[in-house]
Amino acid sequence: MVERLRSLAPWHMDLVLRCGTRTVAGNLCNYAEADHEHVIAIDPDELRSTLEHLYPEGLAGRSFLDVGCNAGGYSFLARSLGASRTLGFDVREHWIRQARFVGEHWDGDTSNMRFEVAHIHDVDLSDGFDLTLFKGVFYHLPAPIHALLRLCDATRDVIIVDTASRSDIPENALVTNFESRSHVMSGVDGLAWMPGGPRAVIDILTHAGFQDCHVAFWLKELAMGPRPELGRFRVIAARQPGRLAAPS
């Protein structure tokens, strides 16, 4: 199993397979390809408390959209909480290969779970979704406002927007960011836009009909590496007023 995991490495998501092995067991200290270096592992279970607060009765009968799904960790979390239908898509085949592999070795029901290789501007969202997770993608896009509005149109209840940000520009501003087209943790377009803070996306969400917005967190400066101005924030938005009266 570990050898198979290594063949699919690097792994960004730390997931437990049916056999008890964690996906990150396949990660290496060094890679032959520079585009596979510097991938930090995360545990998708960090979102569990938020989803349980938003849906205390579980996600039974609800549909879940996982934008830039990577290895599908958040989709598997939503499914474990009862989501009846999930769609995870990512622009990189690398991650979708991982997601499908995890699906084959996950200790749970994977019926009505789909993973697709697709760009956010091309994926079919016509079926609509109750809950959308837009995490780690906004700041990799050349047209993030258009993408967010498209996701809003496809979301019936709640959308979660989680993105990197910049502390050296106004909160409601966007600034260009040029990035690699080939590194597994980057976008594929080269041109991207970084928001200054939550207000940059809250104004878009409000315009799109999400009347209740809550800033779950805003770390203005992560103080990591050579760019201390980089931060991160998460906004939870609901269409129904008062839906997030006491959000987590």
Image: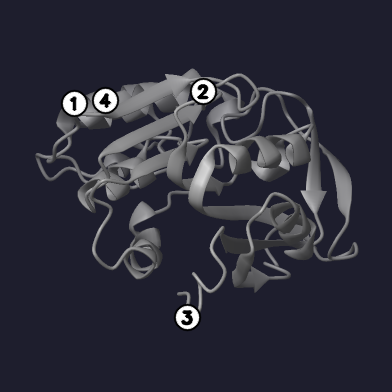
Q: Are marks 3 and 1 in contact (CB under 8 Å)?
A: no
* Residue position for label 2: 32
Tell me the quarter of the image containing the C terminus.
bottom left
Give the structural element (helix, strand or loop) at label 3: loop
Give the class, few, some or many, for how many residues have Cα within 10 Å of label 2's Cα (few <14, many ≥20).
few
* Residue position for label 4: 101
Q: Which mark is residue 246?
A: 3
Badge 3 amino acid:
Ala
Give the structural element (helix, strand or loop) at label 1: helix
**Residue 11, x across and y down, in percent:** 40, 37
Q: Residue at x 21, y 46 (%)?
A: 16
Badge 1 amino acid:
Glu
The chosen color scheme is: one colour
**160 above or below 221?**
above
**Residue 225 figure quarter:** bottom right
Q: Residue at x 55, y 35 (%)?
A: 37
Which one is in front, 212 or 141?
212
- In the rendered view, does 127 fall on the left or right side of 190? left
Q: Nearer the viewer, mark 3 or mark 4?
A: 3
Tell me the quarter of the image containing the N terminus.
top left
- In the rendered view, does 235 fall on the left or right side of 227? left
**Residue 7, x across and y down, in percent:** 33, 22
- Estimate the spatial distance between the alpha carbons at disc 4 and disc 1, rounded to whole Å: 5 Å
* Residue position for label 1: 104
Badge 4 amino acid:
Phe
Q: Earlier in the sequence, mark 4 or mark 2?
A: 2
- Estimate the spatial distance between the alpha carbons at disc 3 and disc 1, rounded to whole Å: 37 Å
Q: Are marks 3 and 2 in contact (CB under 8 Å)?
A: no
Q: Residue at x 66, y 71 (%)?
A: 219
Q: Are marks 4 and 1 in contact (CB under 8 Å)?
A: yes
Q: Earlier in the sequence, mark 3 or mark 2?
A: 2
